[in-house]
Amino acid sequence: MGSKNKLKRFKENDSFANVFQPYREDLVANDFKLKGKWNAEFFKNENPIVLELGCGKGEYSIGLGKKYPNKNFIGIDLKGARFWRGAKTAIEEDMSNIAFIRTQIELINYIFAENEVSEIWITFPDPQIKYKRTKHRLTNASFLEKYKTVLKPDGIMHLKTDSEFMHGYTLGLLHGAGHEVLYANHNVYHNEGAPEAVTSIQTFYENQYLAADKAITYIQFKIK
């Protein structure tokens, strides 16, 4: 994507009512006005809030939003030029249950209050295979602690990935720490029992993985 195109998308994001691009310093200063008030002040309903972390183009958030209109979905990514497409689609299709936030995932506890979120989806994250990149894996112990602070006590986590490494690493960490694994499958399209939301929504890159006969893995769990 050219720099002109990126600038155009950044500018358009600024005009979208469903896009939030807070400054890091404001978040850390606890100056984000919607924290604890997403239902009351933005969505204007009491429906469950579901996050998609590292949402990319926002395809999964849009897919979930269409499938579950009685839930609210918020995609989070640092690259606003990517989720521009999802935000624009939500506006074009008058989807009032979708929002996007441009920020680092590590700051979610400054954006959401304790027990404000019902579910979190992590879809096709970078597995950060090198050992020195462990701290950036979105399912490492420190990230799980952050998720726990914003999730309701019975909140559900979802990890969908094409990386056997990420699947195995996460499953091992969950079992080792005593978290509750509700469902795990290393090839959801070749086994029965996967939740419909896992197999009925496919991103652009996921379709490419499937065309190349690459296994898609999935874990559903609760953080204890």
Image (cartoon, rainbow, N blue to C red):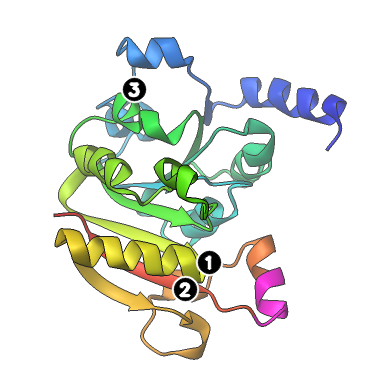
Dot 3: what SS? loop
Q: Give the amino acid type for the residue marked by disc 1 in the picture.
A: Ser
Q: Give the amino acid type for the residue marked by disc 2 in the picture.
A: Thr
Residue at the front extreme, as displayed: 131
Vertical placement of residue 121 versus 31, above or below: below
Magenta residues, start to end: 208-213
Q: Give the residue pinned by disc 3.
A: 34
Foreground residue, 10 or 70?
10
> Which quadrant of the structure image shows residue 81?
top right
Dot 1: what SS? loop
Which is the main secondary structure of the residues drawn in magenta?
helix
Foreground residue, 36 or 97?
36
- Between label 2 and label 3, give the one nearer the viewer: 2
Per the model, the C-alpha gap separating discs 1 and 2 is 7 Å
Where is residue 212? Give x, y as percent. Answer: 72, 79
Where is residue 224? Give x, y as percent. Answer: 13, 54
Q: Give the residue pinned by disc 1.
A: 163
* Point 30% across, 39% down: residue: 45
- Please tell me how many numbered marks the rendered image carries: 3
Q: Give the residue pinned by disc 2.
A: 217
